[in-house]
Image: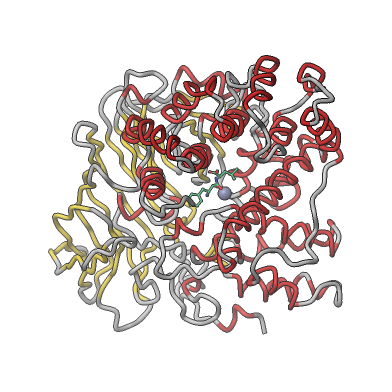
Amino acid sequence: MHWRELLPLCAACGGVACGVVIAMNDACAATDPHSFSRPEEVAVTHLDLDLAADFTARRLAGEAVFRVQRHAASADRLILDSRDLDISAVEARTGGAWQAVDWHLGEADAVLGAPLEIALPAGADRVRVQYRTRPEASGLQWLAPEQTAGKRQPFLFSQSQAIHARSWVPLQDTPAVRFTFTAKITTPAGLKAVMGADNDAADRDGDYHFTMRQPVPSYLLALAIGDLAFKPLGPRTGVYAEPSMLDAAAAEFAATEDMVKAIEQRFGPYAWERYDLLILPPSFPFGGMENPRLSFITPTVIAGDRSLVSLIAHELAHSWSGNLVTNATWGDLWLNEGFTTYLERRIVEDLFGSRQAGMEAVLGYRDLLAEIDRKPAADSALSVDLAGRDPDDGFSDIPYEKGRLFLAWLEQCFGREAFDRWLKGYFARHRFQTITSTALLAELEQYLLATAPGTVTMGQLREWIYGPGLPDFHPVPVSAAFEPIDTARNEFIAGRRAAADLPAASWSTQEWLYFLDGFGDGLDAARMAELDRTFKLTASGNSEIAHLWLKHAVRAGYPAADRRLEQYLIGIGRRKLIVPLYEELLKTAAGRERAAAIYAKARAGYHPVAQVTIDKLFQPGGEGE
Ligand code: BES
Ligand code: ZN
């Protein structure tokens, strides 16, 4: 019997549309520890949102109407998640008539927010909540005009993953529940609203209507408002950005349409119709976010030479791994991110060749080894128990790069052809549903291991998923392209080769990253000065190269980069690029003083999630993520 036949399915749709089977984590009724909602009793299947954006008060205000479906006959309440919402009225509709109903906001938990419990009269099929968000909503960032590229209009964007949707919409905020939605968003004149939905590029009238036909989990709910223009990249791809960034963004991400084609060809049709990019202001705390139909992208990947576009491949790949087949709980984030990192490298290989993909794999592997060293052993498993913890704590290189390596190992063991067949089938079998580590094991056993019995054991799979660190049979990514870099670095360190004689003219971004990373702690100020004279690294406009360079500058005490460091930390809010620099500064007393002075200037411009992370660094015994 197939494992899924053992699970209770939604009577109405078999779980396909409403996602309720999916709440049945690991073939038992385990629930998402990061949501108060009880979708196995009553589940939201559709949302109608009507919100107005007030940039002066920094609030969204309006209403959310929910279509609800009862899964237990006795169910008499709907529980939604909320955080810092001001709720003014709750009503339910029964037989077409609306009436006020009892509701109660439970005690707020620091991580989870507060449950909003709503009494559901017999026969009620709709619930309406009127509410306003607070200026400090953790899932929104309100930007002043000075924080944008154009400097004239304000900007707002949401970042819902993992559990921040509840700070701007009361929701069953668990990836186990999928819903379709419509939204009406009202903005001040001159601003354009976009959502992870069916955007109309031509519309600019301040009154925007969206429809999302494909059911999505709450963490993919996304909204942005700003001075946005659009440029097509291909028949079903395009880019939204502030007007002054638009041409640079379109040039940088010209390969987007080809990326969609590449992945479709191998792993099945793109399920979301259009794929557009939205370039955010530099305070966006992530590299990218895979909001459906509209990935949110940091401007720090616009390097001018397309060298960081694997990030687009990554966010696009989530349209399969994550948005189509979704981790049921945040402890299984690797099922989203590991699969996506695997697909990302496959797209890079298809479009830019195996040399490029190989280099990126080696860089990822190096990050992984460093992360495993930093983490407590239990946190280096792929599947982790995050109950009682902030799901943002699960965010590290482990789910990404260990997850990818696990899949690369399976590919190696079974051969690319068999593995690709399995992966394509996996997406087809689980589309619009959630997946757990346990369910994946069953899926692998039935559909991959059975094709070539004896190739790998279930014990090996469990070691990958539940074991700490890396199994000793893990593959080690290598890249011949990096051998000459090692040689060059060694000769430079040994003083046998001057900076001017390094063969760097032809180095790509990845070769530079490998060159710089390989110094470890061993790049001193004198050598930095020599490299800087020759290659102008302090002035590098490549955000990744600048990041590594500035890390060395802090370590080595290289004052020529001081101003650049401050400018970098104030100008960018992407957590991955700024947190390690603060960590490096905080290692010495003098550095701590500098870090505090810079943070005092930078903090107000950072996104709430970046503020939380960096605040923690400054606390006694604080450490980053
Ligand atoms: N979905 C993630 C971002 C995320 C993960 C947000 C967990 C909140 C919680 C996104 O797809 C991602 O992985 N972004 C990466 C870029 C990628 C190329 C590794 C990032 O932001 O650095
Ligand atoms: Zn991702």
Residue at 74% in and 27% down = 508
Coordinates of residue 2 in the picture (x, y in percent): 66, 80
Quadrant in which residue 322 is drawn? bottom right
Q: Nearer the viewer, residue 337 or 69?
A: 337
Residue 301 appears in view: no
Residue at 70% in and 15% down = 534
Residue 98 appears in view: yes
Q: Is residue 132 left or right of residue 582?
A: left
Q: Nearer the viewer, residue 24 or 302?
A: 302
- In the depicted structure, whether residue 558 falls above or below residue 338: above
- In the depicted structure, whether residue 360 falls above or below residue 509: below
Quadrant in which residue 486 is drawn? top right
- In the depicted structure, whether residue 317 falls above or below residue 120: above
Coordinates of residue 481 in the picture (x, y in percent): 84, 36
Q: How is the image coloured?
A: secondary structure
Quadrant in which residue 43 is drawn? bottom left
Residue at 83% in and 42% down = 479
Q: Quadrant of the N terminus?
A: bottom right
Coordinates of residue 38 in the picture (x, y in percent): 36, 73
- In the depicted structure, whether residue 72 falls above or below residue 520: below
